[in-house]
Amino acid sequence: MQLAMIEDKFIETEKLDAAYLDYGTFFGDGVYEVLRSYDGKIFALEEHLGRFKRSLRGIDIEGIDIETVRQRVLRSFEKFKTPNAKIYFHITRGSGPRDHATEGLTPRFFLMISEVEDYSEQKKNGISAITVPDTRWKRCDIKSLNLLPNVLAKRLAHKRGCDEAIFVDDKGGITEGSSSAFFAIFGDKLQTSPLAANILPSITRQFVLKIYKNAGLGLLEKQMKAEDATKADEIFIAVSSKDIVPVVKLNEIQIADGKPGKYTKLLIKEFEKLVKK
């Protein structure tokens, strides 16, 4: 017999609810997605499901029917009845004894929906960010539940009065934000790091790369140094829950005139047009 203590009460582990024995709790052993809706319509559902499927394959969770996941998302969104919603869901390897390599577990699904917060002020005035060392694991292209470095980075940013933390690798190159993709504009060129194992294939990033020409920009997919980023004409982050948000200060250094730039404003408008289509 094994005992577990839950809120100062001893319980036999065989009698515990499966949630207490979940591999997501024990090991962060699972993958997740976050997407949102606009005016009653879910945006980029197929793109998110495609990435979710790749993440499941990346950590060897099998037997998941993506069509079932799609229907659960749609059914829950319809029931929630909020036009602008944020939808989070994850799948863990399952529930069972705490062992690193237990086989035969049944994956467990979790989904929650909340109303999207109002980020209009951030878009209008821009945000501040700091850079932090990238201490994450080497497969950030998998959207796994292992987010402790991201949490610590974001907490540090907030303690310093900033909204986002930007990861910098061992060679001094920017990878991405703790919960966002990172972009800089030099002249009329949009620059962002190319996708690699240490960068999440952001869905919002994917759509930014579909609309940048509409704003009159060229593209350079090349990693930049943190010190070079502070010399950019404009900086912005891209994330599903907020879309495109200008960054007007990095490491307490003002970017250009300290206001959202013209190209970032154009991209925000182009993204709005894309959503409406």
Image (cartoon, rainbow, N blue to C red):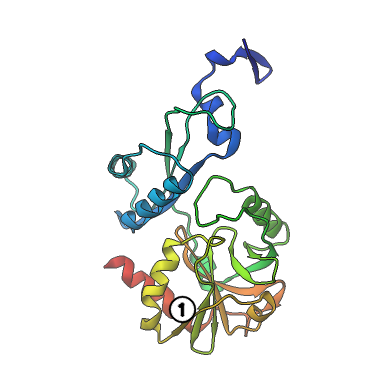
Residue bearing mark 1 = 265
Q: Is residue 84 visible?
A: no
Image quadrant assignment for residue 75:
top left
Badge 1 local density, few (<14 within 10 Å), some, or many (20+)?
A: some
The outermost residue toward the bottom is: 187
Q: Position of residue 135 (x, y in %)?
A: 68, 56
What residue is drawn where x is 37% and y is 76%? Answer: 211
**Amino acid on which disc 1 is placed:** Lys
Is 171 drawn above or below residue 77 in the view shown?
Answer: below
Residue nearest the observer in this picture, 44 or 197:
197
In the image, is 277 to the left or to the right of 267? left
Is 182 drawn above or below residue 227 in the view shown?
Answer: above
Give the position of the N terminus as an image quadrant.
Answer: top right
Residue nearest the observer in this picture, 105 or 79:
105
Q: Is residue 247 visible?
A: yes
What residue is drawn where x is 43% and y is 85%? Answer: 217
SS category of the residue bearing label 1: helix
Q: Position of residue 167 (x, y in %)?
A: 64, 64
What residue is drawn where x is 62% and y is 70%? Answer: 174
Tag count: 1
Image quadrant assignment for residue 6:
top right
Q: Position of residue 13 (x, y in %)?
A: 58, 16
Is 67 drawn above or below residue 22 in the view shown?
Answer: below
Give the position of the C terminus as an image quadrant.
Answer: bottom left
Q: Position of residue 90 (x, y in %)?
A: 45, 42
